[in-house]
Amino acid sequence: MTGDEQAEAGTAGPGSRTAAVRTTHADAELVADALAPDDTDSMAVRVDGDAIDCRIERPTTGGLRSTVGDYVVNLRVAERVIERAREHRTADGTAVDATATDESTADAAETRDTDTDTRHTDTNT
């Protein structure tokens, strides 16, 4: 079985490193769609209700750390862009979905760090 076949079968190849990242979102499908262009072959992503499950497999610990870090940064950026779009729609008086008025989403947006390094360092695709 090749490494690709093992990844598809859900088993890690010899010496590979894996991480599972599960996050919840008001609109998980939209966030996953926003991240899809940056997904690499080392990632398996699926949406489960309000959660995104991402499994990352890399041959080295450093590569895994880098890919997980990039993925988390991309999640934060996608959430911020979606929040800003909702705020903009609200400010313009246009229709906005019910999740945009969720107080927990607004509170989370206020407490998030605004200095995020968004450089993509995982070049092994």
Image (cartoon, rainbow, N blue to C red):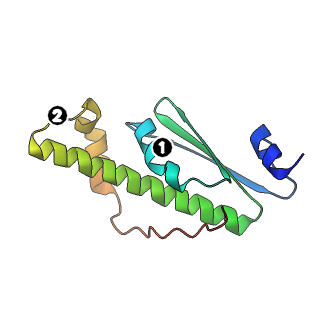
**Left or right: 99 in relation to 64:** left
Q: Which quadrant would the N terminus be assigned to in this image?
A: top right
Q: CA distance from mark 1 to mark 2?
A: 23 Å
Q: Position of residue 111 (x, y in %)?
A: 31, 56
Which residue is painted at 41% across and 40% down in the image?
Answer: 30
Q: Give residue 96's quadrant in the image.
A: top left
Q: Position of residue 39 (x, y in %)?
A: 57, 53
Q: Which quadrant would the C terminus be assigned to in this image?
A: bottom right
Near mark 1 (Cα within 10 A), the count class, few <14, some 14-19 or many ≥20, is many
Residue with the mark numbered 1: 32
Q: 35 and 109: which one is in front?
A: 35
Query: 105 above or below 13?
Result: above
Label 2 residue SS? loop
Whether residues under marks 1 and 2 lie with C-beta atoms below 8 angstroms apart, the answer is no
Query: 116 above or below 95?
Result: below
Residue with the mark numbered 2: 95
**Left or right: 112 in relation to 9:** left
Label 1 residue SS? helix
Q: Position of residue 18 (x, y in %)?
A: 72, 52
Q: Give residue 28's quadrant in the image.
A: top left
Q: Earlier in the sequence, mark 1 or mark 2?
A: 1
Label 1 sits on what residue type?
A: Ala
Label 2 sits on what residue type?
A: Ala
Question: What is the number of callouts on the image?
Answer: 2
Which residue is painted at 57% across and 70% down in the image?
Answer: 121
Q: Which mark is residue 47?
A: none
Q: Position of residue 77 (x, y in %)?
A: 39, 57
